[in-house]
Amino acid sequence: MPSPGRLRRLADKAVPSRESIEGNRWLKPVANRVMHSSLWRFTRRSVPRGVALGMVTGILVPMGQIPASAILALPLRANIPAAAATTFFTNPLTTPPLWVAAYWLGSWMLGPRTEQALAKAQAHAQQGWGDWFLHQAGPATLTGLVTITFVLTVLGYFGTALAWRLWITHKWRKRRRDRAARAN
């Protein structure tokens, strides 16, 4: 396992500098807004917003999740690095189980089908996969995805806020112990 210092050096090499972002010809028109310090500073309010935003864009936006989270972070005053990092929650390993869980949850939420609806669904299924997905799996999957997104967003927001609070409390206690040890 690489050391934290090595990971930090690797991240410093991979992450573009502020000057390179400001000098990018595509970002020049909005560079002053995108580079505002409140969007990049890690604070107790911006990081949970960024995590929640990253969950939403990571799950509901099929492509371009990081640019979408960066754009949406502007009006929401969310932390852009936290939002971008949280979009990696969905990846090739987690997306298939997420969609299967969304289908099952959506099917359960939409309830049992009537005889008429089941006959119609079977008729659509015999016509092909596209019709089956559009009429049966699509609504259930979409319902499940929105529900899962809502739950994970709320958990991400409040979990990050709690973790932040616990971290700050730990720092205060350590500082208090260090002062008491120096005083003795």
Image (cartoon, rainbow, N blue to C red):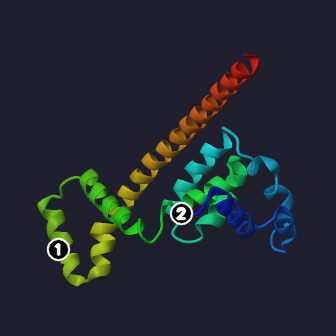
In front: mark 2 or mark 1? 2
Residue name at image x 55 percent, y 38 percent: 163
Q: Amino acid at mark 2?
A: Met
Q: Earlier in the sequence, mark 2 or mark 1?
A: 2
Report which quarter residue 2 is drawn in: bottom right
Identify which residue is drawn at 75% across, 47% down.
Answer: 41
**Could you tell me which secondary element the residue under label 2 belongs to?**
loop
Q: Residues within 10 Å of mark 1 (few under 14, many from 20)?
A: few
Give the vertical position of 63 relative to 163 (above or below): below
SS state under label 1 = helix
Quarter of the image for residue 5 reads bottom right
Up/down of 32 relative to 155, above or below: below
- The residue identified by callout 2 is 1
Residue furthest top in the image: 184
The amino acid pointed to by label 1 is Gln
Q: Residue furthest left?
A: 115
**What count of labels does the image hold?**
2
Which numbered tag is attached to residue 122?
Answer: 1
Residue closest to the eye, 110 or 150: 150
Q: Position of residue 150 (x, y in %)?
A: 45, 48
Image coordinates of residue 20 in percent, x first then y, are 84, 69
Point out the image quarter for the C terminus. Answer: top right
